[in-house]
Amino acid sequence: MKIPIIIDTDPGIDDAIAILMAFAAKNIDIKAITTVVGNVELEKTTVNALKLVEFSGLDIKVARGSEKHIRREHFSAEWYHGVSGLGNLKFPDPKMKVYEKNAYDTIYEEACKCKGKLKLVCLAPLTNIASTILIYPDIVNKIDSIVLMGGAINGGNDTPAAEFNMYADPEAARIVFNSKIPVTMVGLDVTNRALLYKNEIEEIDKANNKMAKLVAKIATRIYENCAKFNVEGAAMHDPFAMGYVIDSSIMKYKSFHVDVEASSELTRGKTIVDVNNLLNKPTNVNVGVDLDRDAFVSMLKELFI
Ligand code: BDR
Ligand code: CA
């Protein structure tokens, strides 16, 4: 049976590769894509999602979500993702229209239809998911699990303490982590090591199909971004999280108690992972701790070449 998922996303160059992976994966059934403010403004992330769906020729609904975070002002990551959010890629203006229902109603509706089997694959600040939980508290018993890209046991990429998706909306992250929904956190501890090397990008580019060419173009932009931080390889943050959904054998996790800092400015959005069980609280999150990079890269090649 295919895995029914909703992709909650803010495309976003690495989101785009993750979405293309889900399009190509034979074991994934995308029920909807829900968009949120994040890397760029909501209008842009929504148009970008529509462009990607139209590019694929698939019939997948795109539902618009939050244009504001729960409490924090939006700041964009244009320096990384480009002004449009999709680097300097050019797509025709999408003809497809956004789904008539908003993201929260769509998530709830699909959760009910899937009878407990729906997985939420969250590649962005958790604003939509937290809002859905606030509007429909019973959703916590209606979905299978959440796999999210975000957080880290150690360090950050937006501030020294915090990863971007957690920093952008820490209040939303707290609601999600404390919701009792089973959560798997695919954080920087693994995604910073999910690097795609130059020769691997070139190999994908050589494939004679439009999907592979697009993936290679986007990966090249990510590669250039990473080079600015002296990292030799394109960090596949969102794609690795999607890869885990497609084949869970590529990542090892451990279960810990996790919460998110939302009071301090200095450590805003830091995921507090109780690796030594000092708080003696029940575990609530499966935290990615190790990965099989080669298996992930093989997956990318199988999907696109
Ligand atoms: C995350 O932040 C965003 O900029 C990326 O799309 C990814 O979801 C990585 O920290
Ligand atoms: Ca993202």
Image: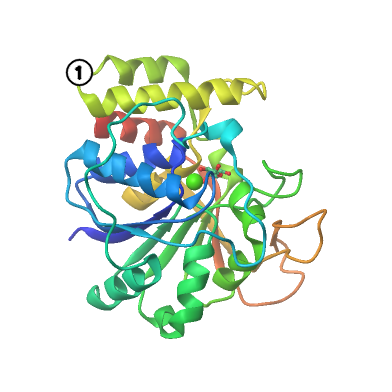
Display colour scheme: rainbow
Residue drawn at x 59%, y 39% as measured from the top left: 77
Residue drawn at x 28%, y 25% as measured from the top left: 212
Residue drawn at x 65%, y 62% as measured from the top left: 170
| Residue 27 image point, x, y percent | 22, 51
Q: What residue is pinned by disc 1?
A: 208
In this picture, is 191 found above or below 277? above
Image quadrant assignment for residue 120: bottom left
| Residue 57 image point, x, y percent | 16, 40
Q: Quadrant of the C terminus?
A: top left
Identify the secondary structure beneath mark 1. Answer: loop
Observer able to see residue 203: yes
Q: Left or right of 156: which side holds 240? A: left
Observer able to see residue 305: no
In this picture, is 61 found above or below 212? below
Q: Quadrant of the N terminus?
A: bottom left
Quick one: label 1, few (<14), some, or many (20+) residues within 10 Å? few
In the image, 184 versus 76, the foreground residue is 76
